[in-house]
């Protein structure tokens, strides 16, 4: 059977109908002490575990003169993505990488089946520290592979309606980041010294979210400030932003992730057994995690129950 279409299917035309957009879901970050620095953890939340493959977002600082000292610790099944607004961090890992990270640069470490690293504020660095560390869950196709490390000092910059965007991962406004992405993903650092009003094109197959690091951004009636995550949902093909002076923010997006994650301590897996094994391997000094040369003490795994 077919037809006719009646007004109970859909209105005859869309005059006066506001475009249907997903609700903005606002989630308060949790404050955590990490290696001597206060961080606001925006993801994961009980109500919202992932945005695409983004599964962890820590906003570090801004702190005045504090230093972050995180000794050698392991990871599996994820990429760490580190981005600084102020200060400096030294990345040391079991692949032999030794890389200072400065504002405007991106460090991306892939854990695969196992890696370990340390993150230090160099003793010579004083003053403000401000940045973010994010994790991206690796898909089944790559999560058992070997680890890797990338440092990017040249990232695409694009301006839109007074807003400056640096493309960290994926593509925005036709500019693509050289950074590795194992799934369809977007990460962009948004920045504006002045008031900015802009509309960014988005992939409607992605879900998106915003974390404000300083200043404020309004999406419709929702004014988003530091200390919260705004989850924007799926199905938006554009995003209108009203940006206040002095704003720094992260726009995150991606295709909804393929599988439920098992996240515990520094491990991203699928099953409890994988975490139990990784935990025991780290404490036994198993070669899958290699060795980091660091002046800091190795961090023991907490007991997995
Ligand atoms: Mn780490």
Image: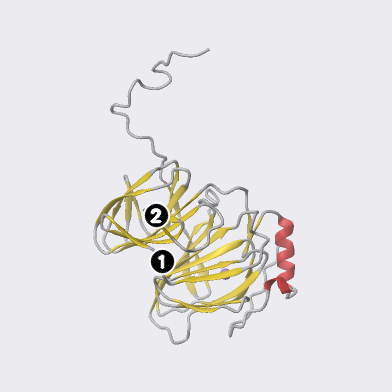
Residue 30 x %, y %: 49, 60
Q: Residue at x 63, y 79 (%)?
A: 292
- Who is closer to the viewer here, 261 or 180? 180
Q: Which mark is residue 174?
A: none
Residue 305 in view:
no
Residue 96 x %, y %: 60, 79
Q: Residue at x 65, y 54 (%)?
A: 140
Numbered disc 1: secondary structure: loop
Would the CB of label 1 be found within 8 Å of ligand 1? no
Residue 200 in view:
yes
Numbered disc 2: secondary structure: strand
Left or right: 215 with respect to 261? Answer: left
Residue matched to label 2:
172
Q: Are marks 2 and 1 in contact (CB under 8 Å)?
A: no
Q: Is residue 102 above or below residue 23?
A: below
Of the residues under marks 2 and 1, which one precedes in the sequence?
Answer: 1
Residue matched to label 1:
155
Residue 272 x %, y %: 71, 56
Work out which quarter of the rendered image holds the C terminus and state it: bottom right
Q: Quadrant of ligand 1?
A: bottom right
- Who is closer to the viewer here, 18 or 304? 18
Image-quadrant location for residue 190: bottom left
Q: Residue at x 38, y 80 (%)?
A: 127
Residue 283 x %, y %: 72, 73
User: Gap in Å between the C-alphas at discs 2 and 1?
Assistant: 12 Å
Q: Residue at x 55, y 59 (%)?
A: 136
Q: Residues within 10 Å of mark 2 (few under 14, many from 20)?
A: many
Left or right: 265 with respect to 4? Answer: right
């Amino acid at each position: 059977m077919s037809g006719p279409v009646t007004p109970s299917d859909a209105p005859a035309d869309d005059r006066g109908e506001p475009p249907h957009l997903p609700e903005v879901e606002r989630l308060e970050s949790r404050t955590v002490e990490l290696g001597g620095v206060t961080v606001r953890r925006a993801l994961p939340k009980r109500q919202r575990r992932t945005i695409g493959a983004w599964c962890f977002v820590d906003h570090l600082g801004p702190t005045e003169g504090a230093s972050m000292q995180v000794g050698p610790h392991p990871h599996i099944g994820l990429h760490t993505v580190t981005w600084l607004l102020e200060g400096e961090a030294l990345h040391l890992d079991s692949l032999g990488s030794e890389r200072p990270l400065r504002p405007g640069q991106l460090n991306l470490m892939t854990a695969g089946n196992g890696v370990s690293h340390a993150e230090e504020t160099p003793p010579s660095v004083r003053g403000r520290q401000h940045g973010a560390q994010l994790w991206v869950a690796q898909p089944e196709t790559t999560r058992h592979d070997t680890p890797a490390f990338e440092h990017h000092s040249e990232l695409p910059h694009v301006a839109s309606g007074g807003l400056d965007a640096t493309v960290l991962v994926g593509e925005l406004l036709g500019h693509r980041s050289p950074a590795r992405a194992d799934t369809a993903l977007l990460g962009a650092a948004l920045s504006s010294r002045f008031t900015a009003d802009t509309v960014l094109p988005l992939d409607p197959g992605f879900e998106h979210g915003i974390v404000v690091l300083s200043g404020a951004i309004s999406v419709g009636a929702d004014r988003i400030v530091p200390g919260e995550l705004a989850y924007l949902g799926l199905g938006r093909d554009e995003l209108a932003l009203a940006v206040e002076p002095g704003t720094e923010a992260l726009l995150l997006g991606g295709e909804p992730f393929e599988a439920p994650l098992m996240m515990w301590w520094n491990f991203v897996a699928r099953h409890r057994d994988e975490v139990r094994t990784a935990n025991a391997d780290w404490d036994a000094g198993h070669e899958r995690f290699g060795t980091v040369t660091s002046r800091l003490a190795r961090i023991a795994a907490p007991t997995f129950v």
